[in-house]
Image: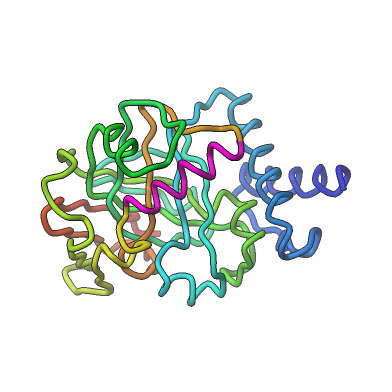
Amino acid sequence: MSGVLDTVTDLLWEANVNRTRMPFVREFIADDDVDSAYEIQRRIVQRKIASGRTRVGRKVGLTNPLVQAKAGVHEPDYGTIMNDMVFHDGVVFDPKDYVKPKIEAEVAFALKKDLHAWDIPTIEDAIDYIAPAFELVDCHYENYGMKIVDTIADNAACAGIILGARQPYGKVDLRDVRLSLTRDGVEITSGVGSNVMGDPINAIAWLARTACEQDVPLQAGELLLPGSIGLIMDFDFGPLYRADITGVGSVTARFAEE
């Protein structure tokens, strides 16, 4: 199996570096071999760190049952956010830097303490702030017909995070916040915070537990994405995308015209 993991890691690393496509990972490992998929992701992260980048956060994916149904999976996964993947409100991306971008809106969390437990009171005590956020989604396959091992290996399809203004945690009930995601002013998806595992904080708890189980606990200063409130949408070149989340704020991003 080690030789197979070496081969897949090399293929995925080349696809990352050259922004190209590769066969699905499930063509090399069993489509339920989650442990091997996370090992591939870890190897890619190690190569990124060796190239001078640093880990600054984690993202949870596939927490919204509507997104799970669309992706054909039934469980969350997580990916790693590196320092060169963090952007801010109003960013304009270059199309040549991505393969097949999509976008989703959520509430980002930042930690002020390390997390070695995953009970809700401990997690809430560790939160520094929240912010409205986009996740820039991308994958290195021919299409988005991924199974769970494909998305895990490819960093849970995470290519970046776009942050709006910081807000204190606890001012609003995140179960009740409402999202409106617009494309040039026309709403293309919406949702309520409880779409994310009943409450976005539950997704952070899942992430904290999983990170501890894998011996990479969440650390102070990390940015955390709990998952999409609405659907994942195509991120077309040119239009302005704006997410408004009640009580949390707004964030915008777009791609330059090709």
> Residue placed at 63% from the left, 46% from the top?
18
Residue 199 drawn in magenta: no
Image: 140 above or below 83: below
Left or right: 5 in relation to 78: right
Q: Position of residue 88 (x, y in %)?
A: 27, 41
Q: Nearer the viewer, residue 151 or 11?
A: 151
Q: Nearer the viewer, residue 185 or 147?
A: 147
Which quadrant of the rendered structure holds the C terminus? Answer: bottom left
Image: 167 above or below 238: above
Q: Position of residue 99 (x, y in %)?
A: 54, 57
Provide the major secondary structure of the magenta segment.
helix
Which image quadrant for residue 83? top left
Left or right: 166 in relation to 218: left
The magenta-colored residue range is 201-214
Image: 70 above or below 76: below
Q: Position of residue 234 (x, y in %)?
A: 40, 68
Which image quadrant for residue 192? bottom left
> Residue placed at 44% from the left, 47% from the top?
59
Task: State the scheme by which the image is colored.
Answer: rainbow
Q: Nearer the viewer, residue 239 or 194?
A: 194
Question: Across the whole image, how many numbered discs are drawn on residues?
Answer: 0
